[in-house]
Image (tube, coloured by chain):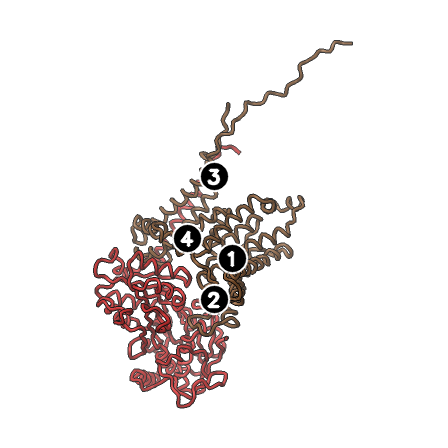
Chain colours: A brown, B red
Amino acid sequence: MPETKVFPPTLPPALPPRKREPLAWRRPLEAVLLPTAALVVALIIFGGFCALAGANPLGVYGSIYKAAFGSWSAWQNTLIRAAPLMLTALCTALPARLGLVIIGNEGALVMGGLGAMLVGLNLGTAVPPVVAQLAMAGAGMAAGGLWIMLAGALRHYRGVNETISSLLLNYIAIAFLKHLVEGPLRDNSFVTKASSAELNPANWLGVLPGTRIHFGLLYGLVVCVLAYFLIQRTTFGFATRTTGGNIRAAKIAGLPVGKLTLAICFLGGSAAGLAGMVEVAAVQKRVNESLVSNYGYAGILVAFVSRHNPLATVLVAMLLGGILASGGILQRSHNLPDATVLVFQGIVFLCVLFSDSLYGKLPWFQEKMIDE
Amino acid sequence: MSPRQPIQLSRRQVMRGLLATTAFGAAVKLSGCSPNNTEGTTTSADGADGGEVVVGFVYVGPKDDFGYNQAHAEGAQAMAAVPGIKIIEEASVPETSAVLETMRSMIEIDGASVIFPTSFGYFDPYMLELAAEFPEVQFFHAGGLYEEGVHPDNVGSYFGYIDEAQYVAGIVAGHTSETGKLGFVAAIPIPQVLRNINSFTLGAKSINPDITTQVVFTGGWAEPVKEAEAVNSMADQGIDIVTCHVDSPKVVMETAEKRGLYSVGYHANQAPLAPEGYLTGAEWDWVSIYTFLGEQFVAGKSVMAGDIDHVFRGGLSEKFCKLSPYGPAVSDEAKADAEAARTALEKGELVIYNGELKDNKGAVVLAAEEKYEQQNIELEKMDWLIEGVQGSTGS
């Protein structure tokens, strides 16, 4: 028997020296620094615009800060304007995670306001206010949700482009609102403008204690946090993101794409519907065409700037709220035209969206592998 | 992908971006969005010093809209000329909680002690809510129905019987129309709008009893596309004179001129927009009431102390409204009749709503021998269209 030479067992080729994971601080820093830098750039460009229009840029910055964040009263002004935007933004942000571009926010808000008001007017004082408000919120969410679900269903079953259909649904909702308040729902004793009857004061949505901010802000915050957990921490959210990443892969993996589409559209629409309910129950107390005041369209902007992240939505909505709050002071203290605030808003959003394209491209923010 | 990959921006892309930004700035500068320097005097002083009364004006649209807001802004400038008054203005404020915040910020940051929210829709609930919260601030609303005991003491209301000017304009239209068909582009069927339609028609019918007015409601205060469509369809129907009640009559006047129709203006003078066809127009004249109120404020008078009336109403004689100068197409005969009616209205000898009147469904709305004088509150609750008007209030 030939002597078998015992070789030591072959070792796998030596691993390259292990690379230690560095402290992952550059990425989070990137997520903070990039938008901040974008804001600074936007302020500089806007300063140039103000100088062209004959105002002192430094004075303008000071006024914007004073009017938007300079005092508790200014903060309240900002938060009141931000509250509906948090909710309407979700109408675009949630379906976007599934790869849909829904812009029917305005229509969903209108339908939500209408639905809530119909229930509120019919309930009157028959039930305790809390029950009535919950029923109104439920009706608003159902109405807004079903409205956007229509766009989702058209997309899934008939292949209709959801962006176009949801946009057109806005016009239908607004026309429907006008028809109702000028016809069947009209309260003829209210002569200022064609409106429904007034909601019973018992069912009005009050203000947060010690402030003039209505409960809509709380609704917005809670719903945004819930939406974040739904998208990031649940099976449903994972399935949604997977479908958004690659719809064919999702189908092959057996995900119920149709149901997901309908569900996410319903959820998005119901958030905007809730905003409509808040608007009628806390602010207007009647339904009329003032319900159409661009909260829905502004919500689209907020969703895109926040990269469809529900938590970022809260911050972006506050930023936009602050910008809108400062619109008045630009006119009153600096004699700038009323469209200035729109210019400012446009510059800020362009800069933030541009900064979006820089993620992962700036070498300084790359995590470096450290050789040992 | 190399971690060292540089930013993917070529020099060309950077140049393009810079050029676009510059072009944008230049376009904004050149397109007339810059502040109107004639108004610069009003806001130059920083903060209210001592005896100055700060008055806040809120508009629902731009201040240069050839319409409702421009009329108020012109009046505000007249008030600013009163010594001791400083005005602050905010335009394009929607009828939502935004107007609450605007008024609050005028009071808290700028120290305004008088607020003029000029749009109808600001009144209820926004202005009433804030008036209750700030009892020391005076609120004056254009067109709101002040009810003693119901509304707070610091609320005042002012409005003009502009339908007197509409009636006179109707006389001019009645003389000028060859087809006997008039057109009225209206925003929303609320009492003020219906009253204008009815008075205009009554003026025209006083010349030609068979004349008709076709009404189109656009459903909104600013619907330029629908307004243009309405004028075009009126031109196709053989209507030869159009007028309107929308926030900015600009589109209606321009479209009418383009289609070769005669036009009657509203809110402000639109003759520059339709030099050929413009007959006349019913214009607001806020200058006298705003100047008067400004003088009262400086003298320390207030509506809650009872020194200033809660309700101001007036027509042609009180200078709340006026007529645009007659255009080239107005005949001497028409001018004579119009001037006669104007004088009669100013002297109170002519009452526009003089029975018997029927609505356009045949029902009697005002019995024979009955009259609605201008002050009659029934007129501010009008919900019908007079016989001869083609259209429906939709309710």
Mark 3 Cα shell of 10 Å, populated few (<14), some (14-19), many (≥20): few
Q: Which amino acid does label 2 sit on?
A: Asn
The mark closer to the camera, 2 or 1, is: 2
Residue at mark 1 to residue at mark 3: CA–CA distance: 42 Å
Dot 4: element = helix
Q: Name the residue under label 3.
A: B8
Q: Earlier in the sequence, mark 1 or mark 4?
A: 4
Residue at mark 3 to residue at mark 4: CA–CA distance: 38 Å
Mark 2 Cα shell of 10 Å, populated few (<14), some (14-19), many (≥20): some
Q: In x, y percent, where is residue B165? A: 35, 78
Q: Name the residue under label 1.
A: A274
Q: Name the residue under label 2.
A: A200
- Indicate whether A11 appears above or below B53: above
Residues at badges 1 and 3 in contact (C-beta under 8 Å)?
no
Residue at figure coordinates x 50%, y 28% from the top left: A369
Residue that lies at the very extreme toward the right in this rendered image: A1
